[in-house]
Amino acid sequence: MSDGGGNDRAPRFPLLLDRMGRAGVTTKPRETLRPQRPLHEAAKDAGRQAVPLGLGLDSASVRRQMVQRLRVEGLRCEAVAAAMHQVPRHLFVDSALAIQAYEDTSLPIGHGQTISKPSVVARMLELLFDGAQARASGHLGRTLEVGTGCGYQTALLAQLAPRVVSIERLRPLFDKACVHLMSWRLDRVRLIHGDGMLGHGPNAPYDSIIAAAGGDELPLAWLDQLAVGGRLVAPSSRPGGRGQVLVVVDRNEAGCVRSEHEAVHFVPLRSGIA
Ligand code: SAH
């Protein structure tokens, strides 16, 4: 199960699978996106929910409604919309919370972590899909995800990319994601229990890198492992304790170009494994 990366552990899925330069900063201030919310609030809400319009959660209609709402809120990328319509989010959360799975809300996934709210996932994937490589090829290419969590976004990435390496530092969540993704395009996905701050050298470079947890700085390993033409999307702290923003880094022949987007509020990026 070891992937040759120290503490890394990867399930033996059948695999088809197989630095920082100049910086220009632009800021597009928008409202703060909150992918996470306190666990006690989510748990309390669970008891109050009804299945939307009396439909079963397995119904594609429920997902279609979610995607329609995302479109109204600004989702334009058809590939991301199709992926979100395809992946049953309720199968990635605790059954007691499944009824809330198609609301635009974050939900607890255990161990103090949460599945990000659909609108934030959609926004990040849309930003990723707007990178040079993705625009040219129509897919995300070799993709690295940091923070597998329950595996929902991993399943979306598997719709959008031919190869996905996803790293989770918490063993119980890694195990949970393995179960959730057991039947989900396994030929494309490689799950790793490891420290995503180190990226994953053996499969680098990546055309797309996406992180679901934010630190003070973007780890240098991510920038090192970003392919020319590739794009990175991650939450990162603004200087001076002014919260987090979504940061996009595009790598070209000359180096890396960084831009800042919406204010966000993600769980912290932590080093090491547990
Ligand atoms: N996209 C996930 C969101 C999970 S929350 C989902 O759909 O469920 C963010 C995750 O990042 C948490 O599971 C947390 O354990 C993980 N994380 C934080 N720091 C990490 C690191 N250095 N390496 C790997 N995973 C990390």
Image (tube, rainbow, N blue to C red):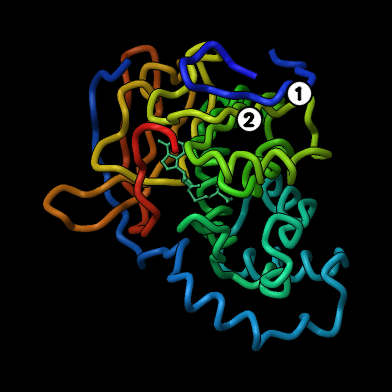
Which of the labelled discs sits on residue 161, or is there none? none
In the shown orientation, is residue 189 left or right of residue 209?
Answer: right
Q: Position of residue 67 (x, y in %)?
A: 70, 63
Any part of residue 169 in sight: yes
Query: Where 167 sits versus 95, above or below?
Result: above
- Secondary element at image label 1: loop
Asked if the residue under mark 2 is in contact with the one under mark 1, i.e. CB atoms within 8 Å, the reply is: yes
Q: Residue at x 77, y 64 (%)?
A: 63
Query: Where 145 sits versus 7, above or below?
Result: below
Q: Which one is in front, 25 or 193?
A: 193
Which of the labelled discs sits on residue 13, or is there none? 1
Q: Which one is in front, 219 or 113?
A: 113
- Secondary element at image label 2: strand
Q: Which one is in front, 138 or 100?
A: 100
Quadrant containing the N terminus in the rendered view: top right
Q: Residue at x 32, y 40 (%)?
A: 259
Badge 1: few (under 14), some or many (20 or more) residues near its Cα, within 10 Å?
Answer: some
Q: Residue at x 25, y 18 (%)?
A: 21
**Cα–Cα gap, marks 1 and 2:** 8 Å
Q: Position of residue 23 (x, y in %)?
A: 23, 28
Quarter occupied by residue 166: top right
View extreme (left): residue: 240
Q: Which one is in front, 204 or 123?
A: 204
Badge 2: few (under 14), some or many (20 or more) residues near its Cα, within 10 Å?
Answer: many
Which of the labelled discs sits on residue 191, or is there none? 2
View extreme (bottom): residue: 48
